[in-house]
Each structure stands twice: as C-alpha cells, then as structure tokens.
Image: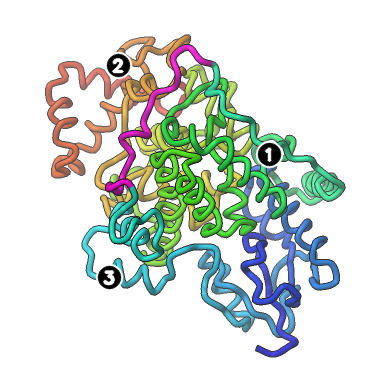
C-alpha cells in the first residue's frame, strides 16, 4: 500500500480495528444526500453524525473530514476501504476506484461462512452458531461446549417478575452530551427548516455511545452489573422498564465502535471467573457470535432479490399511524408502549421488535420490504444488512423458511405471559371476537386462515392448523379483522 493511501472510514466503521496502524491517514465523509433519500429517525441521524464528528475530532490532523452533499464529491485520491456494509456502498467504492479490503467488525469470515453454507438446503442460525463456537473456540471446553450443552434457551425464557414495575437491574451509565452533540442538533434543525430534509420520531437526549470511550464504559458496566440478570429475562417485557437488563450495545457495535470479538471475550471471561452464570453468558454470546454474524453473512450470501421476497403474498400497505410512530392513536397497550419507545428513543429490545411490532405487521399482511425499510430507518441500530434477513426472513417469514422453520406469529397469550401489558388494556387476550377482542389473538387466527395454503405443509405449523380447523367462529374472526383493516387498534 502506498504511503499516500488514506483509509476511508464509513460512519459504521469508526473503531480502531478498521485501521492498519494507529497513525494511518484517514478520510471521513459526512454526506447530506444520505438524509435526503430516506426519512430516518431524528435520534438516529443525531447519533450517526455525532459519532462521525467525534471520530474526526479524536483523529485531528490524522483525518480529512469532508462535509459534502454526496460521497462522490469528497472521495478523491488514493483510498482503501474495509468492505462496506451495504451493496450500494460497495458499488460506490468500486465505481470510485477505491481498494476494497476484507470485511472487519464481524467474527466469522465470508470464506468460512460460504464453506459452511454451501450445499446446505436450509440455513439455520443454530447450526452456524455451533460451527462458529468450534471455529473460534468460544465457550468450549476442549471439543465440547462449556457445561456440556450448546443451547441454554430453556433457562432464558422466564416471565417478568410478577407485580414488578422493573427488573431492578443497574442503570447503564448516562451519556453526557457535549459541544459536538449541540452542533449536530443545530444542524439537523437547520436541515429541516431550510433544506426540506424530514425525519421521523422525536428528538431527545442521546441514549447511545458516539465514542469508543463511551462504548467501552457501557460494555464494562453491562458485563459487571447487567449480564447476570440478562439471560433469564432476555425475552421478558415490562412497560415501566424498557431496557430491562439488555446491554444496549447494538448501536455502538453497528457503528464499529466496538469489535464484537472483544465483547465476546469479556463476556466469556466473566463466566470463566464465576462472575456470571453460563446461561447468561451463552445467551448473550449467541446474539453476537450467532445472530449478528449470521444475518450479516446472509445479506451477502443471498441474492439481492432476497430483499423483495414475499412468499406469503403480503401486499398490504403500512398505515400512516404506524409509519409515523403515532403511538397516541393506539389503544392496545402493548403496541402503544412499544411504538412510543421507538418514537421517543429509536430503540426497543429484540422481543418487542419481533413479537409486538413484527408479529403485528405479519398478521396484517404488510409488504415485507416496506416493513424492513421502516425498521432500518426508525431504529438507531438499524442498517440494511441488519434488517434484511431479520425482518424479511425471520420476522415476516417472507422467504418461505430459508432461514427460520416457522412464522414468528403468536396471539395475545404470548404477550400476556411474557409482559405486563395485558393488565389494564381495553382488549382481552383470551377474546378473539367482539369489541374487546385482542388484535393479536384475533389477528393470529385471521393470519393462519389467510395463509393456510402457504403453511399447511409446514410440520411445525401442524398443531396451529389443527386448532384453526376446530374453530367454529373463524369466519367471524376473519370478517372482523378485515373490517379493522389499517385502523389503529
């Protein structure tokens, strides 16, 4: 590599592991056109720009920081780039003649993933995760998994504490905003006022790290104070405790402020030292080494057409109340609270995403690509590579089972069991027809009825389909849900 070659860092490549040497020349570009093209959450825009500008300030004279309309205007000279995280960005850097290096910020290499995936009829995260554990020697005792078992999910599905308003986990360290944050906020105000750039969601104090120092502080606090209770309650929801014991590290990981391997190593060290139980360590490592790497590789392994998959022929339009995060229009307590969390923070943890938001969208038959785009734009940790497989494949089952064995559809009973939302709600999770029929319970049976031709051959859906055939009021349920249509529940 010539001495004049600069390392072009995108805004999701901000950690030291994206450089080959501490003093390597760097190019950072802030492109306004990115925010013209899509209506991002206001807090996501703030976080990304704050992180980019903080990195520029840290690097000082080592970095050229260019604020332009487009990347192409600023990407000049001899440049090298770590493999970008989207197809559009990859095409751009190739078109501009930059040297494209292997990906960083993930654990398993593309070569190793392809070797694992090729020839497999079905790609399952559990199989990939076990291969990755062996390959990278994570939570292994010789050739065996630590504790003698690979999967401790059964220990990590506890209901929330009965009658509790919160889990009682230690509060993560607060973020202290600075002059850079203030300037970003002023610029976003000006863009809205003068440039016609629009955002969704509300502005608010920055919740997530924009610097490596902040990210390391959050990681240290999570491992020391929140990891132990994380495992048992990782699937639970409480209206008064949106964070529970979750790490809130997805955003800094996806900005590149943390290397996933350093996160995994710290979690495993905590288990090996006896500080946390195995089920909590395994549950968290499964999210990073398993799910995060898995969906990254699927984004590249599947053809670009995967994003437009629509195996259930879902053609409904996302209603305005949902698209605009209008939580105040919703009476269903679970949807209102989760949508409020997205509106006010740009973040809720993975179970509200999957079993409240995604479950509702799938039941209503909204277009999977539009749902994936909404998650991408509205979540501070949302990127195209994150949401393509997570939403199109897992949440909406639009790929006919290429990455998951059955739809993640459920009625109100699941939400009632795993949260405190149903208490005090105007809808009853046990009722499927009538004024107080739960939109999830009714929506579940209407979903099964509508998609019976697509799901009848799925062996994991045999029991629900038998239940559908035993329902005597299925026609009334379907009629009711069609009448409900796109109205806020």
Please provide the residue range marked out in magenta.
147-164
Quadrant location of the N terminus in the rendered image: bottom right
Which label belongs to residue 207?
1
Q: Position of residue 410 (x, y in %)?
A: 31, 29
Closer-to-camera residue (92/246): 246
- The residue beneath circle 2 is 432
Q: Residues within 10 Å of mark 2 (few under 14, many from 20)?
A: many
Note whether residue 73 is visible.
Answer: no
Which of pointers 2 and 3 lies earlier in the amino acid sequence? 3
> SS at mark 1?
loop
Residue lying at the far bottom of the rendered structure: 2
Which label belongs to residue 118?
3
What residue sits 73% from the left and 49% below the top?
A: 197
Instruction: Specify whether residue 254 is painted magenta.
Output: no
Query: With 332 as the anchor, is 43 left or right in this view?
Result: right
Which label belongs to residue 98?
none
Query: Is 237 situated above or below 377?
Result: above
Q: How far apart, in angstroms, are the residues tagged by discs 3 and 1? A: 40 Å
Q: Position of residue 248 (x, y in %)?
A: 58, 41
Closer-to-camera residue (457/181): 181
What residue sits 79% from the left and 51% below the top?
A: 195
């Amino acid at each position: 590599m010539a001495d004049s070659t600069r390392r072009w860092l995108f805004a999701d490549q901000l950690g030291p592991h994206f450089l080959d040497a501490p003093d390597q020349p760097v190019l950072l570009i802030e492109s306004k056109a990115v925010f013209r093209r899509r209506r991002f959450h206001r807090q996501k825009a703030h976080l990304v720009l704050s992180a980019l500008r903080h990195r520029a300030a840290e690097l000082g004279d080592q970095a050229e920081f260019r604020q332009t309309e487009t990347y192409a205007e600023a990407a000049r000279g001899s440049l090298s780039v770590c493999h970008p995280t989207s197809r559009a960005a990859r095409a751009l850097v190739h078109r501009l003649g930059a040297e494209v290096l292997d990906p960083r910020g993930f654990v398993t290499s593309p070569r190793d993933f392809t070797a694992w995936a090729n020839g497999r009829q079905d790609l399952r995260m559990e199989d990939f995760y076990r291969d990755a554990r062996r390959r990278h020697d994570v939570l292994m005792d010789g050739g065996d998994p630590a504790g003698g078992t690979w999967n401790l999910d059964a220990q990590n599905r506890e209901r929330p504490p009965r009658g509790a308003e919160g889990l009682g986990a230690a509060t993560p360290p607060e973020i202290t905003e600075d002059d850079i944050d203030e300037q970003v906020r002023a610029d976003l105000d000006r863009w809205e006022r003068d440039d016609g750039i629009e955002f969704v969601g509300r502005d608010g104090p920055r919740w997530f790290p924009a610097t490596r120092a902040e990210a390391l502080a959050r990681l240290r606090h999570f491992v020391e104070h929140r990891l132990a209770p994380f495992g048992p309650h990782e699937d639970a929801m409480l209206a008064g405790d949106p964070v529970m014991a979750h790490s809130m590290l997805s955003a800094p990981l996806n900005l590149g402020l943390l290397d996933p391997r350093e996160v995994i190593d710290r979690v495993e060290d905590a288990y090996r030292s006896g500080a946390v139980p195995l089920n909590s360590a395994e549950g968290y490592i499964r999210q990073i080494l398993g799910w995060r790497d898995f969906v990254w590789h699927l984004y590249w392994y599947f053809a670009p057409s995967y994003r437009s998959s629509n195996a259930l022929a879902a053609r409904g339009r996302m209603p305005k109340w949902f698209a605009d995060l209008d939580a105040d229009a919703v009476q269903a307590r679970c949807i209102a609270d989760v949508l409020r969390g997205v509106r006010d923070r740009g973040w809720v943890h993975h179970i509200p995403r999957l079993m409240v938001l995604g479950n509702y969208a799938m039941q209503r038959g909204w277009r999977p690509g539009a749902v994936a785009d909404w998650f991408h734009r509205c979540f501070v940790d949302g990127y195209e590579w994150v949401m393509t497989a997570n939403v199109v494949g897992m949440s909406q089952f639009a790929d006919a089972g290429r990455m998951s064995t059955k739809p993640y559809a459920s009625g109100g009973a699941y939400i009632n069991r795993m949260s405190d939302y149903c208490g005090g709600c105007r809808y009853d999770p046990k009722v499927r027809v009538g004024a107080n029929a739960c939109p999830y319970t009714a929506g579940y049976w209407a979903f099964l009825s509508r998609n019976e031709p697509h799901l009848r051959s799925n062996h994991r859906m045999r029991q629900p389909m038998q239940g559908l055939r035993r329902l005597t009021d299925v026609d009334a349920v379907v009629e009711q849900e069609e009448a409900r249509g796109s109205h806020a529940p």
